[in-house]
């Protein structure tokens, strides 16, 4: 499925150690970088993380218009496993088309 020429997205990707990942920091960074003043009204914001987000973190992302793609699994070389590559691409396409 082709992506339109005017669709823009930015992503914060959190794949580090579970304790050091800090998805809240990613939400803050995306809300600043993706704000109207910097990238305009139509830039989609994505938080991509290994960690499954719940509760307040999920709500904070939603309030800032951030699409959360969580629970992405990786191998020991930090490569996304094939099943999750498909999930990631589908989610990106869904929100960018």
Image (cartoon, rainbow, N blue to C red):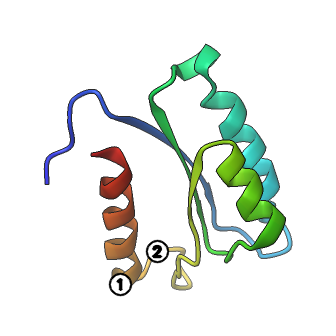
Q: In the image, 66: left or right of 95?
A: right
Q: CA distance from mark 2 to mark 1?
A: 12 Å
- Image quadrant holding the N terminus, namely bottom left
Q: Secondary structure at mark 1?
A: helix
Residue at (71% x, 68% y) in the render:
16
- Residue on which the image places disc 2: 79
Q: In the image, 91: left or right of 43?
A: left
- Residue on which the image places disc 1: 83
In this rendering, the answer to whether 80 lies above or below 76 is: above
Give the x, y percent position of residue 87. 37, 74
Residue at (35% x, 84% y) in the render:
83
Give the x, y percent position of residue 34. 60, 31
Give the x, y percent position of residue 8. 38, 33
Q: Secondary structure at mark 2?
A: loop
In this rendering, the answer to whether 83 lies above or below 11 is: below
Which residue sits furthest top?
37
Label 2: few (<14), some (14–19) or many (≥20) C-alpha neighbours in 10 Å: few
Question: Foreground mark, 2 or 1?
Answer: 1
Which residue sits furthest left?
1
Q: In the image, 24: left or right of 85?
A: right
Q: Quadrant of residue 24?
A: bottom right
Residue at (62% x, 74% y) in the render:
50
Give the x, y percent position of residue 81. 41, 82
Residue at (33% x, 63% y) in the render:
89
Using the image, tell me which numbered label, if any, was put on residue 59: none
């Amino acid at each position: 499925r082709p992506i339109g020429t005017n669709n823009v997205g930015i992503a914060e990707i959190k794949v580090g150690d579970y304790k050091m990942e800090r998805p809240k920091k990613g939400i803050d960074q995306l809300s600043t970088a993706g704000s109207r003043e910097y990238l305009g009204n139509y830039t989609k914001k994505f938080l991509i993380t290994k960690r499954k987000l719940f509760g307040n973190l999920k709500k904070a992302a939603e309030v800032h218009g951030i699409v959360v793609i969580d629970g992405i699994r990786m191998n020991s070389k930090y490569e996304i496993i094939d099943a999750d590559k498909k999930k990631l691409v589908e989610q990106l396409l869904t929100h960018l088309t």
